[in-house]
Image: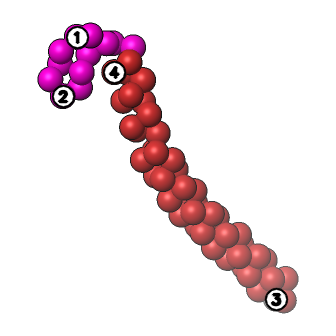
Amino acid sequence: MQFGYVLIAILINLLVGYAIGRQIGLQEGYQRGLSFGPLKMREHTYLSGKCPICSKEN
């Protein structure tokens, strides 16, 4: 009987740790995505040679 309670407690701890880690990872990934977007747009603009505002070629 005691073994069952310990096993359930361990599984609950693992589940809570997984949920917290996943949430932190999602937030970190979102922040990295926000910082990566402008850099990718600049790279595309530089490689294509077109202005992103007026579409004029250089």
Q: Position of residue 33 (x, y in %)?
A: 46, 44
Q: Nearer the viewer, mark 4 or mark 3?
A: 4
In percent of the image, x 84 and y 89: which residue is there? Answer: 2
Asked whether 43 or 18 is in front, the reply is 43
For marks 2 and 4, the one nearer the N-term is: 4
Is 22 above or below relative to 48? below
Say which of marks 3 and 1 sits in front: 1
Look at mark 3 in the image and give the residue it sits on.
1
The residue wearing badge 2 is 53
Q: CA distance from mark 2 to mark 3?
A: 69 Å
- Mark 2 and mark 4: Cα distance apart in space: 10 Å
Q: CA distance from mark 3 to mark 1?
A: 75 Å
Q: Amino acid at mark 3?
A: Met
Judged left or right of residue 12, residue 58 is: left
Q: Earlier in the sequence, mark 2 or mark 3?
A: 3
The residue at the point 39 percent across, 37 percent down is: 38
The residue shown at (44%, 34%) is: 39
